[in-house]
Amino acid sequence: MMTHGDLLPFQALVHRRSGLQLETMAESCLMLAVQKRMLATQAKQSSDYYAQLLGDDAEFDELLSLLTINETYFYREQKQLELLTERFVPALLAKADGQPLRILSAGCSTGEEPYSIAIALREKFGESACRLVSIAAGDIDQHALCRARQAHYSEYSFRAMPQHLRERYFTRVPKQGYRLDETIRSMVEFHSLNLLASPLPEQLADFDVVFFRNVSIYFDAPSRSRILRALHGVMRETGYLILGSAETLANDLGVFQLREDGRSFYFAKGEAPPTPRPPAKPRGLPSHALPVQNAAPRAAAKPLRAPLPAAPEATTAKQLDAIRAKIRAGLYGAALEQLAPLRLAAPDQVDVQLLQGYALLQSRHFAEAAVLARQLLEHDHWSVEAMMLLGFAAKWQDDSTAAIDHFKSAAYTRPDCWPAHFYLGGLWQQAQPAKARREYRTTLRQLAVNPDPDGGLRLPLDLPVADIRFLCEQHSGAESTMSEQRTHRGA
């Protein structure tokens, strides 16, 4: 019977070669894996098997494949795919030199993530995605890479993928599940990748975007820092790093610049990208004739001027709740379509105006959102929601001076508006760190009283409260046991 002491050399070897942390609960997994491989290799003693591991890379790979949990599925964290296709890729293509953009899926497991990236790009850019973007994917688990190349998947891999995409890109194969279409498979090139290897394979370089999602949980903080530095080294200066939403803030280790885009956090190697303008709508084409990969029809961007359908007699709370739900789900175009007739029926109803302004803002129609916010302020000089709309519009257009003015107005008008204090902290963090720490501490105090994701506002902000609290603790100078616990859980 193996003991804890017998496992220690294996733990140290696995950590040294791969960075994986195998302590406490993972010990049972390691013990079962070692015992299974001892039977397979006919090793009589754990020391004999350990000696074999030292000189046999193939056997080490066999053991490692039993220790990693390849739990993944298609379209996991869809909002991050939208961040890639709606913001990063258009902004990077605008500055590209004619060469394809390069994307890396680090820790790709059985391939669901890189293939999801390929499908999302194909949906957005059509057949041209194949020449606009090059996708590489890597993992340390050779068995997972083999399955990724085969591209056969069970029903369980599709639990987050829209049904129409599965029907479009997969073929049902008897007794084998679903096989991915060759057009998508050909967009991804797989590589063996040990993230702690130094240096990384030379063919894995010059990336514009790196996905490193739901992988860092396997590593301790020093290993994560080392991996982040390695990824930093294979990215272009304008590159972006995307981690899983639950692990992003725990990896703010000073290697990359933490950024925020609406309700998503990500990392940038260099400057933040300019926000791309929506593509112009071709003259003479009705909205239904536009290609699928274009965003919401442009007609929805100017609801104040476009012809509107007949309006209902009254706006009910149920209608507004349904629209808020669409905004929280990221369905901004659908929300704008529902809001247009309501504006006609009740042009002065504040809740309708606020929802329309926020949906326009999230759709990146900043000018229209700002116009609507200023109209609100003309009727109510103390509208904190309108001040916040103007602050967001300025911030997301990189006008930090105007954004600070608007968020300060909101904080002065309603001192308990913690989102205003939080965004002030972020805007002041580089130039005036003392002010930033003060705002972060204010945010923490207010969150203790009012942890509402909307900040008590009539806007469906749906902010990630746990992540924001963690970020404020990290940058406010406040140390707490709870912070350490959250750091451990997030890692």
Image (cartoon, rainbow, N blue to C red):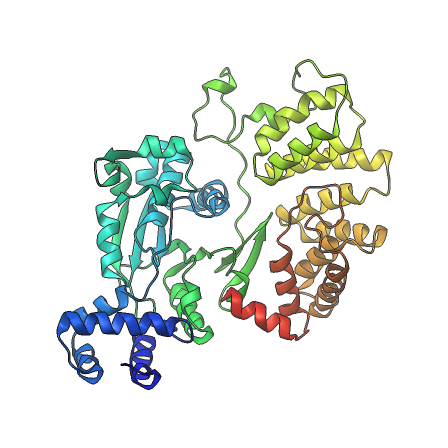
Query: Which residue is rendered at x = 31% and y = 39% of the image?
Result: 131
* Residue 369 visible, this orientation: yes
Question: x, y percentage for residue 219?
Answer: 41, 70
Residue 387 falls left or right of residue 149: right
Query: Which residue is rendered at x = 64% and y = 35% of the image?
Result: 359
Q: Give the answer, above or below, for where 41 lies relative to 284.
A: below
Residue 305 falls left or right of residue 105: right
Residue 314 falls left or right of residue 472: right
Question: x, y percentage for residue 487?
Answer: 55, 69
Question: x, y percentage for residue 423?
Answer: 69, 55
Image quadrant assignment for residue 476: bottom right
Question: x, y percentage for residue 30?
Answer: 31, 72
Q: Give the answer, above or below, for where 161 lies relative to 222.
A: above
Image quadrant assignment for residue 163: top left
Residue 346 falls left or right of residue 76: right
* Residue 19 visible, this orientation: no
Query: Which residue is rendered at x = 68% and y = 73% of the image?
Result: 478
